[in-house]
Image (cartoon, rainbow, N blue to C red):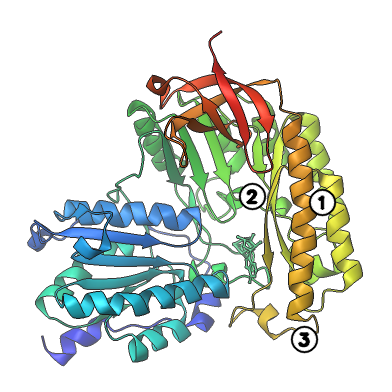
Amino acid sequence: MTEKDYSKYFQTPNLNLARRRTREGAQKIDFVMPANLGKIGRNKKFYIDTYGCQMNVHDSEVIAGILSELGYTPTENENDADVIILNTCAIRENAENRVFGELGRLKALKLQNPDLILGVCGCMSQEEKVVNTLLQKYQHVDIIFGTHNIHRLPEYLRDAYYNKERVVEVWSHEGDIVEHMPVLRQGKIKAWVNIMYGCDEFCTYCIVPYTRGKERSRYPEDILAEIEQLAKEGYQEITLLGQNVNAYGKDFKDREYGFGDLLKVIQKINIPRVRFTTSHPRDFDQKMIDALANRGNLCEHVHLPVQSGNNEILRKMNRKYTREEYLELVRELRKAIPDVAITTDIIVGFPGETEEQFQDTLSLVDEADFEGAFTFIFSPREGTPAAKFPDNVTEEEKHDRLQRLNQKINEKFLAAHKKYEGKIVEVLCEGPSKNDETILAGYTRTNKLVNFKGDHNNIGKLVKVRITEGKTWHLLGEEVNE
Ligand code: 5AD
Ligand code: SF4
């Protein structure tokens, strides 16, 4: 391969460029497999290591779909793999450190098997600092691509094989919406469905608007066709994915159509359960609440990240709502859907957070009565505004706050779960539990994990379970035949 050919690929990211938003709407294109590739993966195996959120989990299903079309087969054992892809997450520093650790470990595998192709993709690839480190210190990585160009993986593999060159192509700006990508789904019971890509919120701590680009919604007709197909294939549950699903449709130039409209149509599709994640409190409107109140296949669970209970911190985070507005939304949701389970994300130790401000978060947890929460210590992300905010909170204090918050949350979960005891709930039976093959596991409509004694023939079905004990993290029960 000539230098010139190689340079056509060599493209590294730039977070400053990624911040910019253009006015143009997203174009839609269809995935096309390059004709001249044949089955370059015949007799070869792939292994994908996925970090981070559900969006990444689903992207890995697309990567697996592309690799399968090229003739590769999946393996659970990285030692057997001819291609290893690390689909990375940039949301916090510890997620990044895990990936670097893993890459260091994989160097030995690459030395043993020089034909192994090692690829890095996902949100970390979108950061110039990471790509520079990979180029300098991790020269055993063969392919680096980003979140916007997964569909070009066949070309990257071809060039890595035939030209034995490093392939680096990361786009700073989002590209088109690519429809009809091949997907190798991880299961036959639950499926992920992307409804939009990117985020325009720019919360000051968050790297996602830079790594995932501007908000782009898939057309409802494409989403509905995918869901109809999943229903035909017998899937029991789908989760609609977007960084901020409530902003769905705001980018359409040719129609007035929002998330509430989409939910109302999906409610008519014959699939037993529909979930969605993640919601931004500011964009949650009455149409969406009405759709949820109509129930049907729409599950009684809303993941509604609050991040903090203090107005000054919320302002510094650029969350665009107050504590009072958030609690009002929680009240409205509970009025419309009395048994709704509301879960949340909370960050402690945001730069300059005082003990009083942290106390506001604790009291909000009491008032909101969350049924689940992911809690994090603020992690400065280079390129985001909050990384430069003055911070006088010590590491020790941040850890102490996280511990106090978790303790409160855990007590509340246990109390909420105790209330389930004696009740009969609907569970989607997913299979044997991880720790005990004789026990089954599944989730309620409110997204509670239930481990229960029952009939293994009912795997993949909705069953009724009587709850015998509420634990902090899950419920125990027995299947009932009514
Ligand atoms: N530090 C800590 N937590 C973060 N999150 C996003 N960015 C950061 C950061 N820089 C959390 C938020 C978000 C969840 C997905 O991750 O709570 O809702
Ligand atoms: Fe990040 Fe805020 Fe967008 Fe969520 S809404 S992805 S926290 S910027």
Residue sitting at x 27%, y 66%:
84
In front here: 23 or 325? 325
> Residue 375 appears at what percent x and percent y?
68, 59
Q: Which amino acid does label 2 sit on?
A: Ser
Residues marked 3 and 2 touching at CB (< 8 Å): no
* Nearest to N terminus: mark 1 or mark 3: 1
* Nearest to N terminus: mark 3 or mark 2: 2
* Nearest to N terminus: mark 1 or mark 2: 2
> Residue 276 appears at what percent x and percent y?
56, 42
**Residue 98, which numbered label?**
none
Residue sitting at x 83%, y 39%:
331
Mark 1 and mark 2: Cα distance apart in space: 18 Å
Q: Residue furthest top?
A: 482
Q: Which residue lies furthest to the right in this view?
A: 356
Residue sitting at x 18%, y 72%:
116
> Residue 273 appears at what percent x and percent y?
52, 30
**Residue 390, which numbered label?**
3
Q: Name the residue under label 1.
A: 365
**Residue 279, which numbered label?**
2
In front here: 207 or 64? 64
Does 230 sit above or below residue 41?
Answer: above
Residues marked 1 and 2 touching at CB (< 8 Å): no
Q: In which quarter of the image is residue 330?
A: top right
In front here: 275 or 444? 444
Crowding at mark 3 (Cα within 10 Å: few <14, some 14-19, many 20+): few
Mark 3 and mark 2: Cα distance apart in space: 29 Å
Residue sitting at x 50%, y 67%:
213
What element does badge 2 sit on?
Answer: loop
Q: In which quarter of the image is residue 9?
A: bottom left
- Mark in front: 1 vs 3: 1
For residue 310, side relative to residue 350 (left or right): right
